[in-house]
Image: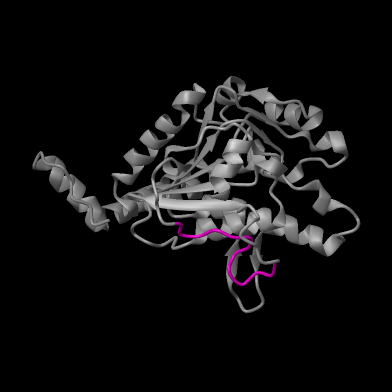
Amino acid sequence: MAVVAGLRAFGAKRPSWLRGNPWAPLSAGFCSPGSAGPARSESEPRLTSMRQQDGIRNIVLSNPKKRNALSLAVLKSLRSDILHKAESEDLKVIIISAEGPVFSSGHDLKELTDAQGRDYHTEVFQTCSEVRVYTQGLLTREVMMLLRNHPVPIIAMVNGLATAAGCQLVASCDIAVASDKSSFATPGVNVGLFCSTPAVALGRAVPRKVALEMLFTGEPISAQEALRHGLISKVVPEEQLEEETMRIAKKIASLSRSVVALGKATFYKQLPQDLRTAYFLASQAMVDNLALQDGQEGIEAFIQKRKPIWSH
């Protein structure tokens, strides 16, 4: 299997869901359905792989030989895996991780030369970051916006270096758990390409002066610094990374999907508002939450001193 071969080549530990756990793959490939791209032969590595069990979907960036760069093809494959049956009640949480010593090196600079041209460059950044409205009125949220607007919590499991758009990916996830060997950087300024799109997510995750130092110098920060500044949620030893990430994911997966989805949407909706508006939106959400079947089930279970039985 290409995933296992890539891990062996880079001396990385395989996640347990790739060790003797033959989950049937749900989706993998070069591009999302309907997008143009060369067909992948069996000898070529998968750019992302996806497995799901017990409500937890694991998406793995599977191109370590290219430092898991977020090429246009990888972005489309990642988007496809995130969107796959997104509304299914069986899906409770998504984990995004990577093979090899680099979580993601960001955009593939070979795709950003004059040879590709402005239209191609525009497609790369639109696919990564922007929200586009097509002429027929269909709204498509691209990868970074999709993480924010997805109904289930999304966890980044980081073991290694995350730079530029790779750092943006971490900052865009709801939760990020990192090993103590991880580091984070926005080094585009060093090659003449300021990390303006990564700065959007970074600047909303860490204090302004921390973000600007990272952006102006391109110098990396350690996992402990990233934790201190709020870029990630938790730092653990490398050997405990998967265990801790799965502990969090399993806890979320044990809860009501509808309640968590409403809570996530409300949190991000109220965040940029003034205090009065934020409380108004949150109060409405509490009322809506009480109207949910699982909202009433949870309260009844608490009163009756029993474990709640969620509808999904």
Asked whether, in this view, residue 267 is left or right of residue 224, the answer is: left
Residues drawn in magenta:
25-37
Q: Residue furthest left?
A: 304
Query: Which of these two is toward me, 103 or 20?
Result: 20
Q: Is residue 129 visible?
A: no
298 relative to 265 in the view: left or right: left
Q: Is residue 32 magenta?
A: yes
On whether residue 34 falls in the magenta region, the answer is yes
Q: Where is residue 232 drawn, in percent x and y?
A: 54, 31
Quadrant for residue 202, please give it.
top right
- Depth check: 48 or 304 in front? 48
| Rendered location of residue 253, percent (x, y) | 33, 45
Please state which of residues 160 and 257 is positioned toward the viewer in this rendering: 160
Residue depicted at x 85% and y 33%: 190
The residue lying at 63 percent from left, 37 percent from top is: 9
Which residue occupies 72% across, 46% down? 197
**Where is residue 101 drawn, in percent x and y?**
63, 32
Tell me if 174 is positioned left or right of 55 in this view. Answer: right
